[in-house]
């Protein structure tokens, strides 16, 4: 991916190494691929994620000296991808007669407090609609590469673009409508609606990739395959099979590997947010 010469976004909050208080647990984003499942997969006690704990306590703060040159390069990479999503969605919102509000992206290490509550790094990257911020511990990229088998800079960019997709849903009012509808449904139906939310965010990530390539030629050979591999790697069925040896479709919250690949690819091929209406689709 050609990113080194790209514009760096100023909407970055670097909280790495800062102590954080424990509050209510948080969900949302790629990290909520069934939180207990992911916790077990990453070797984390699920109670750490599902319970807020003592709100007055603080976790250990990693030393800033632990940062490597690779971490600084990753920070630059994230800033460039974020800037690219800003440019893409600003233009797309203008075409819709709307104004795009740029989100902020928070880098953290270990744990973080957001408007959505307290989150351990094990939940992965997530978007909080309460403060319109994306949160990511850069160590997730190591797990994406080494534990989930999805290496490559475009795979990393896909993760950011997916969370920005949730921000787009928030700005368009889609997230509010879905949450209201979920409150009137049982757990299985609510999960099914969440799957459609996540697949739409995947499609929006593909829309970004299409427009970024059309206007700024950011992609290199193999990048699309990296993104599709990442989408496949974090499918609910694949993660469940790896962690518990069986697949429970009614507990899906993000969609199967095939579904995630299909909708990400649809966004890449069309470049049109209008093609990402997963809620109207009869087949996902």
Image: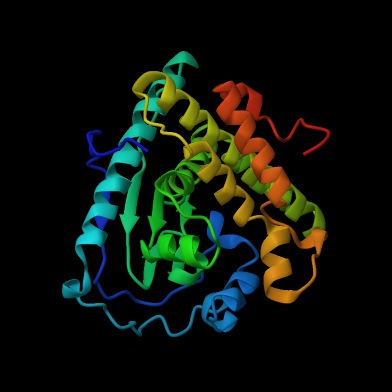
Q: In the visual, does 74 lie left or right of 232? A: left
Q: Position of residue 228 (x, y in %)?
A: 58, 43
Residue extending farthest to the front is 221
Which quadrant of the view contains residue 18?
bottom left
The residue at the point 62 percent across, 22 percent down is 274
Q: Position of residue 244 (x, y in %)?
A: 73, 75
Q: Pick the quarter of the image with the N terminus.
A: top left
Q: Position of residue 119 (x, y in %)?
A: 45, 69
The residue at the point 32 percent across, 35 percent down is 2
The residue at the point 63 percent across, 74 percent down is 36
Instruction: Answer yes or no: is residue 186 visible.
Output: no
Q: In the visual, does 114 lie left or right of 12? A: right
Is 180 placed above or below 95 here? below
Tag count? 0
Instruction: Answer yes or no: is residue 239 visible.
Output: yes
Q: Pick the quarter of the image with the C terminus.
A: top right
Is 176 placed above or below 215 here? below
The residue at the point 66 percent across, 55 percent down is 235
């Amino acid at each position: 991916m050609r990113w080194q010469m790209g514009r760096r976004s100023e909407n970055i909050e670097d909280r790495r190494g800062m102590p954080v208080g424990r509050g209510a647990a948080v969900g949302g984003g790629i990290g909520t691929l069934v939180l207990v499942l992911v916790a077990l997969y990453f070797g984390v006690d699920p109670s750490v994620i599902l319970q807020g704990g003592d709100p007055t306590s603080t976790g250990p703060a990693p030393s800033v000296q632990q940062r490597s040159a690779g971490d600084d390069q990753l920070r630059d990479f994230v800033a460039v991808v974020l800037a690219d999503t800003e440019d893409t969605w600003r233009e797309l919102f203008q075409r819709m007669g709307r104004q795009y509000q740029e989100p902020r992206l928070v880098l953290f290490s270990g744990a973080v407090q957001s408007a959505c509550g307290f989150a351990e790094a094990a939940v992965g990257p997530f978007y909080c609609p309460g403060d319109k911020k994306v949160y990511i511990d850069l160590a997730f990229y190591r797990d994406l590469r080494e534990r989930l088998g999805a290496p490559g800079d475009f795979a990393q960019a896909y993760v950011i673009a997916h969370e920005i997709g949730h921000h787009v849903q928030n700005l368009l009012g889609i997230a509010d409508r879905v949450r209201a509808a979920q409150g009137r449904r049982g757990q299985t139906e609510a999960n099914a609606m969440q799957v459609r939310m996540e697949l739409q965010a995947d499609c929006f990530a593909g829309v970004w990739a299409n427009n970024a390539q059309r206007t700024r030629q950011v992609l290199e050979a193999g990048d699309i395959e990296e993104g599709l591999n990442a989408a496949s790697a974090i499918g609910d069925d694949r993660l469940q099979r790896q962690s518990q040896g069986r697949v429970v479709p009614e507990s899906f919250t993000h969609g199967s590997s095939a579904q995630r690949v299909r909708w990400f690819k649809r966004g890449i091929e069309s470049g049109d947010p209008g093609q990402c209406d997963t809620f109207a689709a009869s087949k996902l």
